[in-house]
Amino acid sequence: MRIDYIICPANIEDKLTTKHNVQITEARQVLLSAPRIRFAEKGYTPGDDVYGAFGQTFGGRYLAVFFVYKSSTKTAIIISARNMSSAEKKRYGRK
């Protein structure tokens, strides 16, 4: 999957910082640093599906970033980001 553009709406950016204590720059770092990506669910519009990206920030923080992928424009629209759970970290480390 190739991501050329990353978009994060202002209301989502506010939620990331207040609820999950994740900065938008950290979420972008995960998406740009060859994360492990898995399909999460079909989107409302054909071709706009939801995916989860699991990776590390440049500072070493393990994050799960969820985004809608618009295949026509190779754009990721961030919808959520949080710390990885213990189980996700174990799975991430095995692969």
Image (cartoon, rainbow, N blue to C red):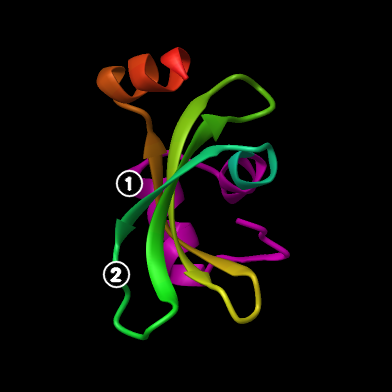
Residue 35 vertical placement versus 74 (above, below): above
Q: Give yes or no for contact between labels 1 and 2 (Cβ–Cβ under 8 Å).
A: no
Name the residue rendered at 49%, 59% in the picture.
13
Residue 27 vertical placement versus 58 (above, below): below
Which is in the foreground here, disc 1 or disc 2? 2
Which mark is on residue 35? none
State the residue position of label 2: 42
Residue 91 % position (x, y): 35, 20
- Compared across the picture, whether 28 is left or right of 53 comes to right
Residue density around tag 2, few if under 14, some if 14–19, many if 20 or more, within 10 Å: few
Name the residue rendered at 60%, 81% in the picture.
72
Q: Is residue 17 magenta?
A: yes
Residue 90, image quadrant: top left
- Identity of the amino acid at label 2? Lys
Q: Nearer the viewer, residue 78 or 15?
A: 78
| Numbered disc total | 2
Mark 1 and mark 2 lie on one chain; the one further toward the N terminus is: 1
The N terminus lies in quadrant: bottom right
- Compared across the picture, whether 21 is left or right of 72 comes to left
The span picked out in magenta is 1-29
Residue 74 % position (x, y): 64, 70
Residue 25 % position (x, y): 65, 46
Residue 80 % position (x, y): 39, 54
- Identity of the amino acid at label 1? Lys
Residue 92, image quadrant: top left
Residue density around tag 1, few if under 14, some if 14–19, many if 20 or more, within 10 Å: few
State the residue position of label 1: 19
Query: Which secondary structure, mark 2?
Result: loop
Residue 91 vertical placement versus 79 (above, below): above
Query: Which secondary structure, mark 1?
Result: helix
